[in-house]
Amino acid sequence: MGIIADNSRAGDEAEIRLWREKSGKALDELWKRSWIRDGISPGAGRLKELELQLSEFSSLCDMIVLVADGSMAAMLRGMLRALTGTGHKKLVVFGGTLSAGSYRVLFQEMEKHSCGMVAFSCGEETLAQRTAFATIRKFLQDRYGTDGAGRRIRIVLNGEARYLAEEASADGHEMHLLEADVQAAEASGTDAMLVPGLLAGADMQAFMEGFRRMLTSTWWDRDADCYSLCLAGHREEDIVYWQEELAGAAEWLAALHKAAGIDARAVFMPREEAALREDAFCTHLFCRSEDSDIMLPPFPGADPDGSLNEMAKSAMEALWRRTTGTKLTLDGMTPGDYGELVCFLQISSGITGFILQN
């Protein structure tokens, strides 16, 4: 496995036993969901099929605006920050704002590029989502004409989408239809992640292999649910991360847990250490081996071996020892390890949510 969960400071055995029965029921329910079934037994050649579907759209655009809101937007930002792509396209997640200044900055950037848009919806769209889609489409229509703009717009949605489904049907926009039961909180193993990942040039084959490893791991038959069980006993959570590449994952996890009723927030260390709450459950996200390291000159507090990575690890371990929570460590910042992490967090959030609602 590419990730390790340390729950030795997460809670006592009595607390875990209190929720164990509900955890089993939660897993039974989760394993009925289409995103898990499809992830365990993916269709043959799915990624190749998607690449063919996206080929014309991709060739037209060197900047793509991903219109999304809420946890979907956070999931997409997390993917773009964590997965290094081989392509040269600029992908921008936009939504959740009614600020004219934000639109001005976006359009100024779009003027420099050949542009397209992918819009995402897993339910009734917010006012901000409708505004973003309609306004960016108008920009594309004014620039490329109605037919030209139509070739530069794709929509990823489930059966509960309203406005985007109507607009796609009326104007003939290309759609990627998700399974009807896929919600925004369950979208990371679906086309909602694969489409932008492929457009970014990321290794989505490796990502999905990691995702599937976590889905099929026997860890779920043992104690993979400990994080979910311990978190369910708290109402506040600080999600601590130490590498910028994990910022999006932390923000996405916070969005999922807020929806479940936990006051969760992402905290970037050590810059935001003052924001840590004394009684909050602390979820630590840390990558053990980054792609690069910096050798430091001697100074007070520097790592004896001069490694910036090792100094960050020592600081993380010191904080870990004085908090209550779970430590999730990635072996490396690879697509496969990130796929495992995303899958683990998505299943864990589903367990926690089920416990809190039942």
Image (cartoon, rainbow, N blue to C red):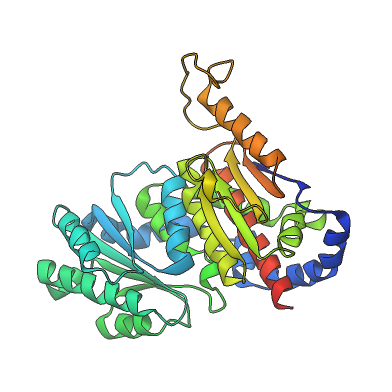
| Closer to the camera in the image, 115 or 9 | 9
List x then y, in percent, for residue 267.
52, 50
In the figure, is residue 225 to the left or right of 124?
A: right
Residue 97 is drawn in which quadrant? Answer: bottom left
Give the residue at x 58% y 26%: 310
Give the residue at x 28% y 50%: 90
> Eyeballing the image, is 191 above or below 334?
below
List x then y, in percent, for residue 71.
48, 66
| Closer to the camera in the image, 358 or 58 | 358
| Closer to the camera in the image, 189 or 112 | 112
List x then y, in percent, for residue 32.
69, 73
In the figure, is residue 22 to the left or right of 45?
A: right
Residue 41 appearing in the image: no
Q: Quadrant of the C terminus?
A: bottom right
Residue 161 is drawn in which quadrant? Answer: bottom left
| Closer to the camera in the image, 207 or 250 | 250
